[in-house]
Image: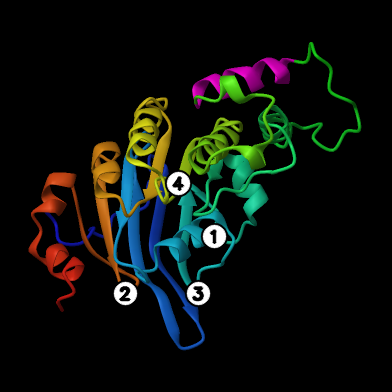
Amino acid sequence: MVAVEAHRPQTAAHALELQGVSRRFGGLVAVRDVWLALEPGERRAIIGPNGAGKTTLFNVITGELRPTTGTIRFFGHDVTRLPPHQRIRLGLARTYQTPLVFPRLSVADNLYLAIRGVQPWRLSLRRPRAEDPERVEVERLAERVGLRHALHALAGALSHGEQRQLELGMALASRPKLLLLDEPAAGLSPGEREQLTTLLLALEPEMTVLLIEHDMDVAFQVAQRVTVLHEGRVIAEGTPDEIAMNSTVQQVYLGGTQ
């Protein structure tokens, strides 16, 4: 196993490529010289102790934060300075540590708004009709994430696990090429984690998935490769089995020093 990801040359074949990406907050370096490359259809997990810089890195990838240094490429396009909404239109979607849903709207309406949000007519005042193809898509998405039975329930009345499922459905509404999941298993029961893992394993093989996850069982079942962050920098990268046997990773998680 390579201890850290090699600096690979830019290629349009990569779904996502980070070249020397750093992010500072004053004197604090939250992300430090990260090089990362994902192939189309790859499942990659990012793991690391609390404060390792994982969510900051996600926010840089999605455009919510700009990198202090470095370049971000998405299927060959330089998106380093693009705002989040333009990255979404290129095919990027994400979820958050805390599910972002509209609690006073039904499951169906949440999914409908997510579908409509990526349509060219998204700002139209046209009222939805029962025969609209978007309504059919709502039912398909609800079935896909296991919420067909709860279409008319208020999102705020769902369990935490069901809200996670709804947010995943909303992210999938844009048919993304790259899906970023920020701790999707956080707060879930063992049964809910098992259901989530099943949902993630059933995603289209051409969809690239990058997830942050503290639950190693989920991360190692879903991911083909794992990148480990510590104090903002990549310290290891490899298959789940290689990472599980890596002495440096074990030392970091047990509180030792490198």
Cβ–Cβ below 8 Å for labels 3 and 1? no
Residue 75 in view? no
Circle 3 packing at 10 Å, graded few (<14), some (14-19), many (20+), is: some
Q: Give the residue type that dot 1 points to.
A: Thr
Q: Which residue is mark 4?
A: 181
Q: CA distance from mark 4 to mark 1?
A: 20 Å
Q: Which residue is mark 2?
A: 231
Q: Give the residue type that dot 4 points to.
A: Leu
Q: Residue furthest bottom?
A: 27
Q: Nearer the viewer, mark 1 or mark 2?
A: 2
Label located before the other in sequence (2 or 3): 3
Q: Quadrant of residue 6?
A: bottom left
Q: Which residue is mark 1?
A: 80
The stretch of residues the image draws in magenta is 133-145
Q: CA distance from mark 4 to mark 2?
A: 21 Å
Q: Is residue 18 above or below residue 157?
A: below
